[in-house]
Structures are given as structure tokens and as C-alpha cells.
Amino acid sequence: MKTTVKKLPKNQKEITIELEYNELTPYLQKTISSLNEKYKINGFRPGKVPYEIIKQKLGEEVILNEAIDDIIRSTYAEAIKKEKIKPIDMPKIEVLKAAPNNPFIYQAIISLLPKTEICDIKKINIKKEKVEIDEKKVDMTIKKLAESRAKEKLVKRASKKRDVVKIDMNIFQNKVAIEGGSALNHKIVIGDPYYIPGFDDKLLGLKENDKKEFEITFPKEHYNKNLAGKLVKCKIKVKGVYEMEIPKIDDNFAKSLGNFKNLIELKKQIKQNLEAEENIKETRRQEIEMFEQLVNESKFEELPKILVLREVKKMIQELKDNLAQQGMELKDYLEHLKKTAQEIEKDFLPQAELRVKTALLIREYAIKNNIKTSEQEINQEIEKTLKQYPDDKNKDQFKSETYKNYLKNILTNKKAVDELKKKIIR
């Protein structure tokens, strides 16, 4: 068997595999044995037809065509092992020559895992921000709780302060819909702080079915650096204006929310909940900033198209799942945005590339620093999962090699991320 390797763009390799016709004999004989069982020839019982009779009856070309899949499957595995090639996906195969008494030649286009050169992590420094919840925020949260229990009365007038305005909204940056910037039947209380300051003021004086377009600036301290301080365009349609009848905030209100003796106990619990939420947000901000800097400072070989497209598919599925939780379907969402599925996929490409590079960086860091996950750690995690889902009918899948390899990758990546955070976030 002769192999020739050629480097292609997008971190791919083309391997041409050539076998002399006499090298095909074992595969042809194996194929004839299966054809012996498959075809009925007069005068012979199935499985008892002599080799030469089948060959004469069917022809060498038919036998060769039947054998092609087996030839490629066996010789491709041997060729990539010989050339020390580690594919990341199934190859694209093209048969170049297949004829009796001639060499058998085919090509395989293979996508490879791109090499990653991690920057000097000592140069990356992410500062922790202290999480503090003041009484004003606690009071605001309780106020929202009260408003969530308010009776909403639909009114046929222009909106004013303290009204609830239900809207369909889309937020764009440079004519591209931002992630999480679209919603149907989204409720906003005019006068309450919103994640885009001043957004609620733009809804003042609007009535049901009114449409409005306006520009507004994201706060400079927004956790998403791509949006922080940036001007965006908003398109909204008013679905309804509601007047609120809000219950009085006192000890009785606190008791109505659960096992609270009084308003003081409710405030204490609310503060703890808000601190936990803000700590999660802060941790997420630190990780996003850390990986953005690491990716920008590190070097990557050209990304294979298959890796990026695979990540785009994941993002589309995540979008579908999020929409399903809101009782929506992707088709309706796209119609609302006036976009095609192809346009959304194109919008996702930059974020998909960032996610792929982040995954490559974590993998490389784990390899370079000999970060591993033991069999014992994997088994402990499986046992933990089985305790959480004792009645799962598919629990045997948690003990499969496929699941163990998946778990090993997850746990190893987590260790690598935790170590990076310890060294970078201060």
C-alpha cells in the first residue's frame, strides 16, 4: 500500500491511498464469500457456489464494487496510523480509480485538530470585583415581588409611570440581532431600573399596538464587553398597557410568600439570594474576560470549517432549547426577526470561533500541565449521578465507555479551568 500526503488550507490534509490489484485479493475473497450466501445460482445451494463460478457469473467489476467499502474502511485506518494523522471527524472519501486488474486508488480529505500556542499566562490579570448588596437593592427586589403579585388591569390609554408595558422587542448592534436581545411578550415596569438604563423611559406615552424604533447606549460597566458602552438600535411593538394594583409590603405580605415570620426575615433571605446570584454573575464575568484575553493573546492554527460549523449547530440547539422554555419555536422566532436560519448561523460564526478556540486552549493547557482525571474520580462522579437519578431506565449508559470518556473530558477541562482561574484571577 502506497500513501501520499498533501497539506491543504483550513488545517486539512489530503491523503492518497493506492493498492496494487493483488493487494485486494483478501477483500475480494471475503466479498465473494458474502455474495455466495446472497445470490442463488441454478444447480448450487446458497453458500456452496464455487469461487470461479461466482466470479464468472457476476463479473470482477461487480465483486470489486461490492468490496470497496470494506477496502476503504480497513486501509484508511492503516494509512492514518502509518502517517500519524489524528482526524477530528469522518473523512471525505473520493474513489479515483477502481477497475479489474488495475491499482485501486482513493483520496481522503481529513480535518485535523489545530495546534494551539498558549500565551504567557502571567501577563493576563483579571481583577475580582467585590459583590455588595445594599438595602436599596433588597427593597427594590421585594417591591418587584409585590408587583409580580399585583393584579394587572388592561387599560386603553397611553402608558405612564408604574404601568406595566408588554412588548415584543429586538435589539440590534450594527444591524445584527444581539444574543438575548429578542423577546416576545416581554414585560417592563416603567420607572424600575432596567439592564439598559433609560429603556423604560422610551415606553412612556405609548398605547397598545404602537411601534417605535430608537437608539440607546448600553452601560459602560455591562459584563458583556462587546456591548459595554455601545450604541444599539431597538425595535419594539406594544402588546398591551396594564395598570397595577400592588399589595401592601408588610409582615402579612412576607408571610404570604412562605415560611417567614415577618418582613425582616424576608429581607434577610432576599439579601442572601441576591448575593448568591451576583456571585454567580461575577464568576461568569471573570471567566468570560479571562478566556477573551487568553484567546486574543494566544496563537491558533487555522480552524477547520467542520469544528466551527459543529459549534454553530450546538448554538442553534441551545437557542431552540431556550425558546422552548419560553413556549416558542425557532420558526416563529426567525419570522419575528425577519431572518432566515442561514442568516442566524452566519451571525453565530464569530462566537462559535471564540468557543472553539477556548476549548482548544483549555485542552492544550491540560496537556501541557499534565492535568488528568483518574478512573476513581470518574467512577465517583458516575456514582453521584446514579444517586441523583436512581429510577432512570437508561442508567446503564452511565457505565458505558462512551459516557466515561465524555465524563473524563468534562472533569479534566474543569480542572484545567479551575487552575487557570487560580493563576489569573486575583
Image (tube, rainbow, N blue to C red):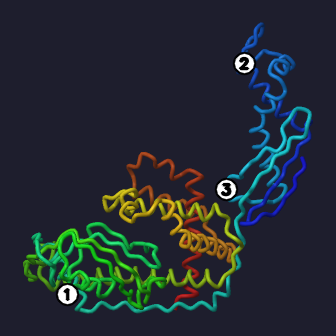
Name the residue furthest top: 43
Residue hosting label 3: 89
For the residues labelled 1 and 2, the Cα–Cα distance comes to 82 Å
For the residues labelled 3 and 1, the Cα–Cα distance comes to 54 Å
Q: Is residue 23 above or below residue 149?
A: above
Apparent side of residue 243 relative to residue 114 in the rendered image (left or right): left
Residue located at (74% from left, 11% from top): 45
Disc 1 residue type (three-letter) = Asp
Apparent side of residue 217 relative to residue 274 in the rendered image (left or right): right
Residue hosting label 1: 139
Q: Is residue 109 visible?
A: yes
Residue located at (74% from left, 48% from top): 93
Answer whether labels 3 and 1 touch (C-beta < 8 Å).
no
Q: Which residue is nearer to you in this view: 106 or 422?
A: 106
The kind of secondary structure element at disc 2 is loop
Please give the count of numbered marks on the rendered protein. 3
Q: Which residue is nearer to you in this view: 171 or 33?
A: 171
